[in-house]
Image (cartoon, helix red, strand yellow):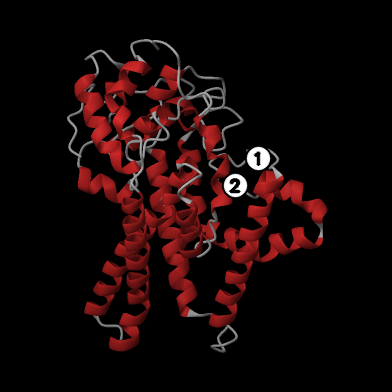
């Protein structure tokens, strides 16, 4: 991938040395992808319907409320895991995973109004000259602004489910009817981004065919979702819509909290060196079971992922152990590990408050330069 692999030593980090340690871990295991994804999405569907059906059969008792709460939490965790495979789709080889891409969109992407075309520009986040600049739609200078930006970043979860429906129920057919709207919509309303001012580059005809197909499927699903709950049930407000909205908001909040801990967000627009990008990204090797709940499908090893974007998620834990044990003690890779998500978000909050006061800020070093892996 362009811009992700330096040719020489980078201020205490030798890429060739790291690559030699994990060279045999590059091949994705299709069986793991299929079992993990299908198990997550199908179990998520079961618990989602548990939220809706428990009071239907047993009424609203304290025990039922407790059961609904458990189903809600499990739904968020399982759906979050299934959804995060969109990140893997970008990095998987084109050949050999066509059926998996189709299945993910059919069972998950279309269902949640996040078809895979929305995430294609993720590759720019991994280009060395783009990372943290205006060409990177997945970066904001959160450490260099006040805490208000962090609050807004999380609070947007309340509106994004409604915006997603509007995008595919209203904007998509408008583009079909008025093709001149397509360039504007493609650049500003067709990407999963962190930076709301990001402009998506124009797409090839092949990509646009995929966009149109996935748009049509999302539009059809949206129409059916609204008709089935409203007209067919003769209700102006289907209770299932409220459950779906609550689940959508919950998933978004969980993902945004995860995203806050993925980087240290210290860049303020200029191009960063490879070493700076690596130190700006974070690994969470400790508390493996808990970390996997909020950072599934390898996202808790975000610095390692930036180092080797094509390394399959199921090998990231093993790769991190090898790098931790095999790299020299003074390697900057050891500084990418943090103790916990909450400690890293607290550090981000402190940096943003410092920036709000107008002081010079810098990323705080990890609590341990050589965290003990427990994957």
Mark 1: which secondary structure? loop
Residue ID for mark 2 = 191
Between 193 and 116, the one nearer to me in the picture: 116
Residue 218 point in image, percent of width and height: 59, 64
Residues packed near mark 1 inside 10 Å, few (<14), some (14 to 19) or many (20 plus) = many
* Mark 1 or mark 2: whose residue is earlier in sequence: 2
Image coordinates for residue 205, horizontal then vertical, percent: 71, 46
Which quarter of the picture shows residue 134? top right
Q: Is residue 173 above or below residue 286?
A: below
Residue drawn at x 43%, y 45% as measured from the top left: 88
Label at residue 200: 1
| Residue pictured at 65% horizontal, 64% vertical | 216
Q: Position of residue 146 (x, y in %)?
A: 48, 33
Q: Are marks 1 and 2 in contact (CB under 8 Å)?
A: yes
Q: Camera-side residue: 90 or 243?
A: 90
Q: CA distance from mark 1 to mark 2?
A: 7 Å
**Nearer the observer, 324 or 227:** 324
Q: Residue at x 17, y 37 (%)?
A: 374
Please report the residue visible at 42 percent of the width from the left and 26 percent of the height from the top: 354
């Amino acid at each position: 991938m362009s811009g992700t692999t330096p040719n020489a030593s980078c201020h205490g980090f030798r890429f060739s040395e790291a690559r030699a340690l994990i060279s045999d871990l590059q091949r994705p295991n299709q069986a793991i992808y299929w079992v993990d994804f299908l198990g997550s999405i199908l179990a998520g569907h079961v618990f989602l319907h548990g939220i809706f059906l428990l009071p239907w059969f047993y009424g609203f008792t304290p025990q039922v409320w407790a059961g609904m709460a458990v189903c809600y939490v499990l739904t968020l965790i399982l759906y979050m895991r299934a959804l995060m495979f969109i990140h893997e789709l970008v990095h998987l080889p084109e050949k050999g995973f066509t059926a998996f891409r189709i299945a993910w969109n059919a069972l998950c992407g279309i269902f949640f109004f996040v078809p895979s075309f929305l995430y294609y520009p993720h590759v720019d986040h991994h280009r060395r000259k783009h990372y943290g600049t205006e060409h990177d739609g997945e970066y904001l200078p959160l450490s260099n602004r006040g805490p208000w930006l962090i609050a807004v970043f999380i609070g947007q979860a309340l509106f994004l489910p409604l915006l997603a429906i509007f995008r595919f129920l209203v904007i998509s057919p408008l583009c079909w009817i008025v093709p001149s709207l397509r360039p504007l919509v493609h650049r500003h309303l067709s990407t999963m981004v962190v930076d709301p001012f990001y402009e998506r580059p124009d797409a090839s005809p092949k990509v646009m065919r995929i966009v149109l197909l996935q748009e049509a499927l999302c539009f059809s699903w949206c129409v059916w979702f609204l008709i089935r709950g409203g007209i067919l049930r003769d209700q102006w407000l289907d209770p299932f819509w409220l459950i779906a909205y609550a689940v959508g908001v919950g998933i978004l909040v969980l993902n945004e909290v995860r995203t806050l801990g993925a980087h240290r967000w210290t860049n303020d627009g200029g191009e960063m060196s490879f070493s700076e990008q690596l130190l700006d990204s974070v690994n969470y090797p400790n508390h493996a079971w808990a970390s996997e709940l909020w950072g599934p499908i390898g996202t808790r090893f975000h610095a390692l992922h930036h180092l080797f974007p094509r390394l399959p998620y199921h090998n990231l834990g093993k790769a991190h152990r090898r790098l931790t044990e095999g790299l020299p003690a003074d390697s900057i890779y050891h500084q990418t590990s943090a103790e916990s998500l909450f400690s890293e978000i607290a550090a981000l909050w402190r940096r943003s408050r410092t920036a709000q006061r107008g002081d010079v800020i810098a990323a705080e070093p990890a609590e341990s330069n050589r965290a003990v892996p427990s994957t």
